[in-house]
Structures are given as C-alpha cells and as structure tokens.
Image: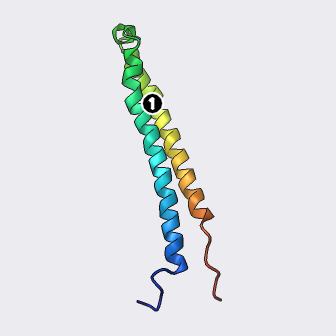
Amino acid sequence: MGGRDEDGPDLVQARALIRVQLRIALATAAAVLAVLAGLPPLLGLVPALGRARLYGVPPVWAALALGVQPLWVAISVRHLRRAERAERDVPRPADPS
C-alpha cells in the first residue's frame, strides 16, 4: 500500500520505540507492584500501628492516604518523562523537501 516496503525505516523505528516504551511500562509496573505488595507485610511487622490512633484515625490509613498518593504521582511523572524522552530520542526521517 502506498509503495512502502513493509520493513521500511519507519516500521523499524516504530518497533524500536514500542520496545523501549514497553520496557519503561514494565519498570513502572514493577515499582507500583513492589509498593502494593510490600506495604502490607511492612505494616504487619509493627502490629501496634493497627491499634494506635491519631486524631481517631489509624496511622496506617494516614500513611496510605498521605504517603502513598505522592508516591503514585512521583512514579507517574517519572514514567511520563521517560516515555517522552524515548519518543524524542527516536531518529526522525530526513525531510524530503
């Protein structure tokens, strides 16, 4: 279609970009999974935190509400910056004009 070779430079570049973005996405997912899977055992190591109250709120809830949310934002911003940098680093074809 359109006279383009299926293995042209555009396709090669697109595949390379997809591989880089997949690697970035998997690293981001691993970071999120580490937090989600690691938080309950970490909080389980200190059972007194489950019984304590800070202004009527368990400190575990405060940690989840105030500590984890900024972490999600930081991970999201890092992911976005890495994905944008990967797109910028893809070589662009020369302008035919």
- Compared across the picture, whether 42 is left or right of 16 comes to left
* Residue 9 coordinates in the image, percent (x, y): 55, 78
Which residue is found at the position 34% from the left and 8% from the top? 51
The C terminus lies in quadrant: bottom right
Examine the image and state in which quarter residue 96 appears.
bottom right
Q: Going by the image, does 86 lie left or right of 51?
A: right
State the quadrant of the N terminus: bottom left
Q: Secondary structure at mark 1?
A: helix
Residue in the picture at 37% in, 16% down: 44
Furthest toward the bottom, the residue is 3
Callout 1 environment at 10 Å: few (<14), some (14 to 19), or many (20+)?
some
On screen, 48 above or below 70?
A: above
Residue 88 placement (x, y as % from top left): 61, 63
Please tell me which residue lies in front, 93 or 61. 93
**37 or 7: which is nearer to us?**
7
| 17 shown above or below 68 | below
Q: Residue at x 62, y 70 (%)?
A: 91
Q: How is the image coloured?
A: rainbow
User: What type is the residue that disc 1 sits on?
Assistant: Val
- Is 34 rendered above or below residue 26? above
The residue singled out by tag 1 in the image is 68
The residue drawn where x is 54% and y is 71% is: 13
Picture coordinates of residue 23, whole percent (x, y): 49, 53
Please state the horizontal and vertical placement of residue 62, each as a whole percent of the image: 41, 21
Nearer the observer, 61 or 11:
11
Q: How many callouts does the rendering have?
A: 1
Image height check: is 75 above or below 96? Answer: above
Task: List the single residue furthest toward the front.
Answer: 7
